[in-house]
Amino acid sequence: MRHVARKRFGQHFLQDKSVVAAIVGAIAPAPEDVMVEIGPGLGALTRPLAEKAGHLHVVEIDRDLVRRLVREFDPRQVTVHEADVLGFDFSKLGAELRVVGNLPYNISTPVLFQLVRMAAGLHDVHVMLQREVVERMAAAPGGPEYGRLSVMLQYHFAIETVLKVPPNAFEPIPKVESAVARLVPLALRSRAQDEELFAAVVARAFAQRRKTLRNSLAPLVAADDYEAIGIDPGARAQELAVEDFVRLANHLAQRRNAAEGPTEVGRVAPRHKG
C-alpha cells in the first residue's frame, strides 16, 4: 500500500538510489557498529545500512510506517522503536553510537541540540538537513550564518558537509535543497568548566546579535571582565570564536566560585562597583 507523506511529521522520502549509495558510502557501516537511524521512513537507507552493519536500530514516530517496517524487516536485523525521537533515550542502545538520519526540517534544530546533549555517547553522526541549516552548523565566525547553533555544535563536534542533495531526490519534492553533514565528537578542546553556564552565555549573546557584547551580556559581564580575558566589549556575538565563548564562560565561573558561591544554575550574580 502506498504511504501518503504526512506534513505534520515533515515527511519527504528519499527516492534517488544514487544519493542513497553515496550516503551509505560516506557512512561506511561496519558489522561491529552500534547504528541507529532516526526517521527511517520507507526504508531507503534502512536496508543497505542494515545489510552492511548487520543490525540497525530505527526510531520512527509514524505508526503506519512502524507497522510497515516491522513487516518488511527481520527483527534480528532491524529493531524498530516506535517513539518520538525528541523523547527517545538513546543511551539504552549502548555507547559509541553511530547516528544516521534524514531529519524532518520542522524539528531539525531540536534534534541537533539533543545530539549535543548526547555527544559523549556518540561515535559519529550523519544527518541530512536543509542545506542552509548545514551551512549554519559549519559556519565560521564573522559571517551571517554563524550563530548559536554554530557555536554549540562546533564546541562538541568537528563538522563537514559530505554531500549536497537536490530536491528531486525526494518524494514529495521539498522546496529547498538538502545536504548531508558529518559530525564527529571532539576529544581535544578547551572545555568549559560549567557547560550550562557556557550554553547560557552563548544563548544570551546571540539573542540580540546586533547588539555589542557590552549591551547583550550586561549586567552578566563587567568591563574589567572583558579586559581580563582580552575580548573587545564592542564586538558582536558573531565575531567570537568558540574558544572565546569558552574563555568568557570560564572567567565568569571562576569569578562566581571565588565570590559567595554558586548561584542558580546558568546565572551569575551581577558584579557591582563602588
Image (spheres, helix red, strand yellow):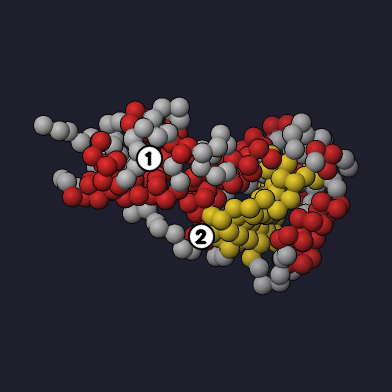
The quadrant where residue 131 appears: top right
Q: Is residue 75 visible?
A: no
Looking at the rendering, in which quadrant would you find the C terminus? top left
The number of callouts visible is 2
Residue type highlighted by circle 2: Leu
Residue located 32% across and 50% down the image? 250
Which element carries disc 2, helix, strand or loop?
loop
Question: Sequence order check: which comes first, mark 1 or mark 2?
Answer: 2
Query: Nearest the camera: 187 or 35?
Result: 187
Label 2: few (<14), some (14–19) or many (≥20) C-alpha neighbours in 10 Å: some
Q: Is residue 50 visible?
A: yes
Marks 1/2: CA–CA distance: 21 Å
Query: Nearest the camera: 165 or 53?
Result: 165
> What residue does disc 1 label?
201
Query: Nearest the camera: 194 or 90?
Result: 194
> What residue does disc 2 label?
186
